[in-house]
Image: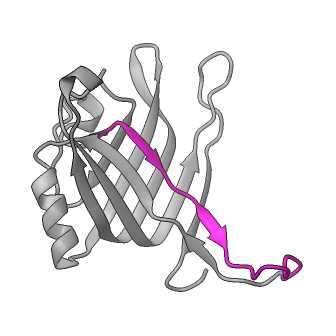
Amino acid sequence: MASDFFIKLDGIDGESYDKAHSKWIEVIDFNHGSMQNVASGRVSDVAGRGQFKPFVFTHNVDKATPKLQQYCMSGQKIAKANFVACRAIGGAQVPVYEVTLENVKVLSCSVEGHDANEGGVLPVEHVELVAGKITWKVTPIKPDNTKDGAVEASFNQLENA
């Protein structure tokens, strides 16, 4: 399996041939987060509005690249994006971390390539997504490789709830 990270964006096909993630985009790396807007020197403030940091991922340039660029330039919204990080257990890819983004916009796309002598084989694309709503889900794996109870939370930035 070439990748343990996958993302599927409504209306945009990737090139994954993984059985469980056919036509998803194979992700090389990702990062995202949340932050609380607290003014310097005011760390005791309790009620503040949180903010999502962009969900950033990198993938090899593939057939999703032109569409991602088009969505970025047009500002067209993507209804939903599903990201999954999998762990290989018993020959299967088991989702252990999932992020669902709703009301998504492509904030930026950039493509870069490196000389093959520097380890570059294919150009890669860095993509930043922003969303109105985000849901996080973690499925812990017990030492005997069975799933434990999933933990899920979400936040709607548009409704601040």
Left or right, 56 with reference to 49:
left
Residue 86 drawn in magenta: no
Tell me which residue sits at (41%, 63%) in the image. 101
| Front residue (pair 32, 12) | 32
| Front residue (pair 156, 48) | 48
Q: Position of residue 113 (x, y in %)?
A: 21, 40
Tell me which residue sits at (21%, 34%) in the image. 16
Left or right, 150 with reference to 10:
right
Q: How many marks?
A: 0
Using the rendered view, name the quadrant where residue 142 is placed. Answer: top right
In the image, residue 124 above or below residue 69: above
Q: Which residues are magenta?
A: 25-45
Using the rendered view, name the quadrant where residue 60 is placed. Answer: top left
Residue 36 drawn in magenta: yes
The answer to whether one can see residue 127 in this image is yes
Tell me which residue sits at (45%, 38%) in the image. 85
Q: Position of residue 54 (x, y in %)?
A: 45, 64
In the image, residue 112 above or below residue 105: above
| Front residue (pair 147, 158) | 158
Which quarter of the image is occupied by the N terminus? Answer: top left
Colouring mode (rainbow / by chain / secondary structure / one colour): one colour
| Front residue (pair 58, 99) | 58
Which quarter of the image is occupied by the C terminus? Answer: bottom right
The answer to whether one can see residue 25 in this image is no
- Looking at the image, the residue that sits furthest to the right is 44
Q: Position of residue 10 (x, y in %)?
A: 23, 60
Q: Position of residue 61 (x, y in %)?
A: 17, 42
